[in-house]
Image (cartoon, coloured by chain):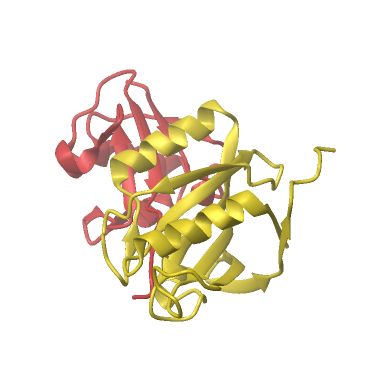
Chain colours: A yellow, B red
Protein backbone atom coordinates (compact mmCIF):
# COMPACT_ATOMS: atom_id res chain seq x y z
CA UNK A 1 0.00 0.00 0.00
CA UNK A 2 1.09 3.53 -0.73
CA UNK A 3 0.44 6.06 2.03
CA UNK A 4 0.83 9.62 0.82
CA UNK A 5 -0.06 12.99 2.30
CA UNK A 6 -2.73 15.17 0.75
CA UNK A 7 -0.39 18.05 -0.18
CA UNK A 8 1.99 15.76 -2.10
CA UNK A 9 -0.91 13.97 -3.78
CA UNK A 10 -2.40 17.29 -4.88
CA UNK A 11 0.99 18.54 -6.13
CA UNK A 12 1.42 15.45 -8.33
CA UNK A 13 -2.08 15.91 -9.76
CA UNK A 14 -1.42 19.62 -10.36
CA UNK A 15 1.82 18.80 -12.16
CA UNK A 16 0.09 16.25 -14.39
CA UNK A 17 -2.69 18.69 -15.28
CA UNK A 18 -0.25 21.54 -15.92
CA UNK A 19 1.89 19.52 -18.34
CA UNK A 20 -1.04 17.91 -20.16
CA UNK A 21 -1.06 16.99 -23.07
CA UNK A 22 2.59 16.05 -22.50
CA UNK A 23 3.43 13.46 -19.91
CA UNK A 24 4.58 14.84 -16.55
CA UNK A 25 7.12 13.00 -14.42
CA UNK A 26 8.90 13.22 -11.10
CA UNK A 27 9.71 11.48 -7.87
CA UNK A 28 8.94 11.71 -4.20
CA UNK A 29 12.06 10.97 -2.20
CA UNK A 30 12.06 9.76 1.38
CA UNK A 31 14.49 8.51 4.00
CA UNK A 32 16.06 5.18 3.00
CA UNK A 33 14.01 2.22 4.16
CA UNK A 34 11.22 4.40 5.59
CA UNK A 35 8.63 3.99 2.82
CA UNK A 36 7.68 7.63 3.58
CA UNK A 37 7.34 9.87 0.51
CA UNK A 38 8.37 13.22 1.95
CA UNK A 39 10.17 15.33 -0.67
CA UNK A 40 8.51 15.93 -4.02
CA UNK A 41 10.83 16.67 -6.94
CA UNK A 42 9.13 17.63 -10.19
CA UNK A 43 11.32 16.64 -13.13
CA UNK A 44 11.37 17.99 -16.66
CA UNK A 45 10.20 15.47 -19.22
CA UNK A 46 13.24 15.60 -21.51
CA UNK A 47 11.21 13.76 -24.16
CA UNK A 48 8.54 16.54 -24.11
CA UNK A 49 6.07 14.03 -25.48
CA UNK A 50 2.43 13.01 -25.01
CA UNK A 51 3.44 9.34 -25.14
CA UNK A 52 6.87 9.13 -23.55
CA UNK A 53 8.78 10.50 -20.60
CA UNK A 54 12.42 10.46 -19.64
CA UNK A 55 14.35 12.33 -16.97
CA UNK A 56 17.16 14.41 -18.46
CA UNK A 57 20.38 12.46 -17.82
CA UNK A 58 22.24 15.35 -16.18
CA UNK A 59 19.28 16.17 -13.94
CA UNK A 60 18.93 12.48 -13.12
CA UNK A 61 22.48 12.37 -11.78
CA UNK A 62 21.98 15.58 -9.79
CA UNK A 63 18.80 14.15 -8.31
CA UNK A 64 20.44 10.89 -7.22
CA UNK A 65 23.47 12.68 -5.79
CA UNK A 66 21.16 14.85 -3.73
CA UNK A 67 19.31 11.76 -2.49
CA UNK A 68 22.57 9.95 -1.64
CA UNK A 69 23.76 12.99 0.29
CA UNK A 70 20.46 13.00 2.24
CA UNK A 71 20.33 9.20 2.77
CA UNK A 72 17.16 9.20 0.71
CA UNK A 73 15.78 6.92 -1.96
CA UNK A 74 13.01 7.28 -4.55
CA UNK A 75 9.90 6.19 -2.65
CA UNK A 76 7.50 7.21 -5.42
CA UNK A 77 8.23 7.53 -9.14
CA UNK A 78 5.31 9.14 -10.91
CA UNK A 79 4.27 10.01 -14.42
CA UNK A 80 1.09 10.76 -16.28
CA UNK A 81 -0.68 9.18 -19.18
CA UNK A 82 -2.59 11.79 -21.10
CA UNK A 83 -4.81 9.74 -23.41
CA UNK A 84 -4.90 6.30 -21.83
CA UNK A 85 -5.68 4.72 -18.48
CA UNK A 86 -3.45 5.00 -15.44
CA UNK A 87 -1.99 1.54 -15.91
CA UNK A 88 1.67 0.73 -16.70
CA UNK A 89 2.29 0.33 -20.42
CA UNK A 90 4.62 -2.27 -21.84
CA UNK A 91 7.24 0.50 -22.05
CA UNK A 92 6.72 1.41 -18.39
CA UNK A 93 7.15 -2.20 -17.34
CA UNK A 94 10.20 -2.78 -19.53
CA UNK A 95 12.00 0.30 -18.24
CA UNK A 96 11.03 0.14 -14.56
CA UNK A 97 14.32 -0.06 -12.69
CA UNK A 98 13.55 0.76 -9.07
CA UNK A 99 12.14 -2.42 -7.56
CA UNK A 100 11.66 -0.70 -4.21
CA UNK A 101 9.61 2.22 -5.51
CA UNK A 102 5.90 2.80 -5.77
CA UNK A 103 5.17 3.57 -9.42
CA UNK A 104 2.34 6.10 -9.48
CA UNK A 105 0.38 6.72 -12.66
CA UNK A 106 -2.00 9.61 -13.11
CA UNK A 107 -4.30 9.78 -16.11
CA UNK A 108 -5.38 13.19 -17.31
CA UNK A 109 -7.33 11.79 -20.26
CA UNK A 110 -10.70 12.88 -18.89
CA UNK A 111 -10.24 16.54 -17.96
CA UNK A 112 -6.84 17.49 -19.40
CA UNK A 113 -5.63 20.82 -18.01
CA UNK A 114 -8.99 21.51 -16.39
CA UNK A 115 -10.23 20.90 -12.88
CA UNK A 116 -11.86 17.57 -12.29
CA UNK A 117 -11.01 14.15 -10.96
CA UNK A 118 -8.10 12.11 -12.28
CA UNK A 119 -7.19 8.46 -12.03
CA UNK A 120 -4.37 8.14 -9.48
CA UNK A 121 -3.10 4.57 -9.11
CA UNK A 122 0.00 2.94 -7.67
CA UNK A 123 1.92 -0.18 -8.60
CA UNK A 124 4.95 -2.23 -7.76
CA UNK A 125 6.90 -3.24 -10.85
CA UNK A 126 9.48 -5.95 -10.14
CA UNK A 127 11.11 -8.16 -12.78
CA UNK A 128 8.44 -7.27 -15.31
CA UNK A 129 5.61 -8.13 -12.95
CA UNK A 130 3.02 -5.48 -12.10
CA UNK A 131 1.11 -5.51 -8.83
CA UNK A 132 -1.44 -2.79 -8.17
CA UNK A 133 -1.71 -1.57 -4.61
CA UNK A 134 -4.10 0.59 -2.62
CA UNK A 135 -3.44 4.30 -2.23
CA UNK A 136 -4.24 5.87 1.12
CA UNK A 137 -4.25 9.66 1.24
CA UNK A 138 -3.76 11.12 4.70
CA UNK A 139 -3.71 14.71 5.99
CA UNK A 140 -0.21 14.12 7.31
CA UNK A 141 2.09 11.10 7.22
CA UNK A 142 2.06 9.27 10.56
CA UNK A 143 4.90 10.12 12.92
CA UNK A 144 8.04 8.03 12.51
CA UNK A 145 8.22 4.91 14.69
CA UNK B 1 44.49 2.13 -11.49
CA UNK B 2 41.49 2.05 -9.19
CA UNK B 3 38.16 3.30 -10.44
CA UNK B 4 35.21 3.47 -8.11
CA UNK B 5 31.97 2.36 -9.74
CA UNK B 6 28.66 3.25 -8.15
CA UNK B 7 26.12 0.46 -8.72
CA UNK B 8 22.37 1.15 -8.89
CA UNK B 9 19.94 -0.83 -6.73
CA UNK B 10 18.72 -2.96 -9.61
CA UNK B 11 22.23 -4.24 -10.41
CA UNK B 12 23.33 -4.93 -6.84
CA UNK B 13 22.30 -8.56 -7.25
CA UNK B 14 25.56 -8.82 -9.22
CA UNK B 15 27.69 -7.15 -6.56
CA UNK B 16 26.44 -9.01 -3.51
CA UNK B 17 24.47 -5.95 -2.46
CA UNK B 18 27.44 -3.59 -2.61
CA UNK B 19 26.56 0.01 -3.55
CA UNK B 20 30.00 0.67 -4.95
CA UNK B 21 32.80 -1.55 -6.19
CA UNK B 22 36.32 -0.96 -7.47
CA UNK B 23 37.40 -1.83 -10.97
CA UNK B 24 40.47 -1.40 -13.16
CA UNK B 25 40.83 -0.10 -16.68
CA UNK B 26 41.98 2.82 -18.81
CA UNK B 27 38.68 3.15 -20.66
CA UNK B 28 35.04 2.62 -19.79
CA UNK B 29 35.01 -0.52 -21.95
CA UNK B 30 37.98 -1.92 -20.02
CA UNK B 31 36.36 -1.10 -16.68
CA UNK B 32 33.17 -2.87 -17.72
CA UNK B 33 35.17 -5.92 -18.80
CA UNK B 34 36.88 -5.89 -15.41
CA UNK B 35 33.51 -5.62 -13.66
CA UNK B 36 32.31 -8.61 -15.64
CA UNK B 37 35.28 -10.67 -14.41
CA UNK B 38 34.36 -10.10 -10.80
CA UNK B 39 30.59 -9.77 -11.17
CA UNK B 40 29.56 -12.09 -14.01
CA UNK B 41 26.41 -11.09 -15.85
CA UNK B 42 26.65 -7.36 -15.21
CA UNK B 43 28.14 -6.53 -18.62
CA UNK B 44 25.06 -7.69 -20.47
CA UNK B 45 22.95 -5.30 -18.40
CA UNK B 46 25.11 -2.39 -19.51
CA UNK B 47 26.00 -3.20 -23.09
CA UNK B 48 23.96 -4.44 -26.03
CA UNK B 49 25.36 -5.12 -29.50
CA UNK B 50 28.66 -3.50 -28.62
CA UNK B 51 27.26 -0.21 -27.35
CA UNK B 52 25.92 1.16 -24.11
CA UNK B 53 22.27 0.30 -23.67
CA UNK B 54 19.96 3.16 -24.58
CA UNK B 55 18.33 3.31 -21.15
CA UNK B 56 21.45 2.97 -19.02
CA UNK B 57 23.25 6.19 -18.11
CA UNK B 58 26.92 6.08 -17.20
CA UNK B 59 28.76 9.10 -15.85
CA UNK B 60 32.47 9.68 -15.39
CA UNK B 61 33.18 12.37 -12.83
CA UNK B 62 29.61 13.64 -13.30
CA UNK B 63 29.80 13.79 -17.11
CA UNK B 64 27.43 11.66 -19.16
CA UNK B 65 29.82 9.38 -21.08
CA UNK B 66 27.77 9.82 -24.24
CA UNK B 67 29.36 13.26 -24.48
CA UNK B 68 32.92 12.11 -23.79
CA UNK B 69 33.42 9.13 -26.06
CA UNK B 70 31.00 6.51 -24.77
CA UNK B 71 32.71 3.18 -24.18
CA UNK B 72 35.99 4.71 -25.37
CA UNK B 73 35.88 7.38 -22.64
CA UNK B 74 39.31 7.48 -21.00
CA UNK B 75 39.66 6.92 -17.29
CA UNK B 76 42.44 7.55 -14.85
CA UNK B 77 43.21 6.57 -11.31
CA UNK B 78 40.70 7.93 -8.84
CA UNK B 79 37.97 8.64 -11.37
CA UNK B 80 34.46 7.92 -10.29
CA UNK B 81 31.99 6.09 -12.49
CA UNK B 82 28.27 6.18 -11.71
CA UNK B 83 25.76 3.86 -13.36
CA UNK B 84 22.10 4.92 -13.27
CA UNK B 85 19.25 3.36 -15.18
CA UNK B 86 17.15 5.91 -17.04
CA UNK B 87 13.91 6.88 -15.37
CA UNK B 88 11.66 6.64 -18.39
CA UNK B 89 8.50 5.14 -19.77
CA UNK B 90 5.20 6.34 -21.05
CA UNK B 91 2.01 5.35 -22.77
CA UNK B 92 4.14 4.38 -25.78
For the C terminus of chain A, the quadrant is: top right
Asked whether B42 or A67 is in front, the reply is: A67
Q: Can you give x and y, in whole percent of width and height, for residue A107 in the image?
A: 48, 73
Q: Is residue A45 in sight in this rendering?
A: yes
Residue depicted at x 57% and y 66%: A125
The quarter holding residue A2 reads bottom right
The quarter holding residue B45 reads bottom left
Drawn side of residue B70 relative to residue A39, left or right: left
Q: Can you give x and y, in whole percent of width and height, for residue A83 in the image?
A: 38, 80
For the N terminus of chain A, the quadrant is: bottom right
Drawn side of residue A123 relative to residue B42, left or right: right
Seen as rendered, the residue at the extreme right is: A145
Drawn side of residue A57 relative to residue A101, left or right: left
Q: Is residue A78 in sight in this rendering?
A: no
Counting every numbered tag in the picture gives 0
Q: Say if A58 sits above or below A119 in the image.
A: above
Asked whether A9 or A30 is in front, the reply is: A9
Q: Say if A12 sits above or below B79 in the image.
A: below
Residue depicted at x 45% and y 37%: A64
Seen as rendered, the residue at the extreme front is: A115
Residue depicted at x 64% and y 73%: A132
Q: Can you give x and y, in whole percent of width and height, for residue B38 in the image?
A: 46, 40
Q: Can you give x and y, in whole percent of width and height, for residue B77 in the image?
A: 30, 18
Q: Say if A93 sits above or below A75 in the image.
A: below
Amino acid sequence: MLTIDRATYDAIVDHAKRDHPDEACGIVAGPEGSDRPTRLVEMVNAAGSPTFYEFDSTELLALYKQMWANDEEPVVIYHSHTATEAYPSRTDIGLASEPGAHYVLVSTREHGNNPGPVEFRSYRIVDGEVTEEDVTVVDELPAVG
Amino acid sequence: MAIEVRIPTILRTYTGGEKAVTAEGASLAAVIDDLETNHPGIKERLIDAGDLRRFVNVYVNDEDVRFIGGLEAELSDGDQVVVLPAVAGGAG
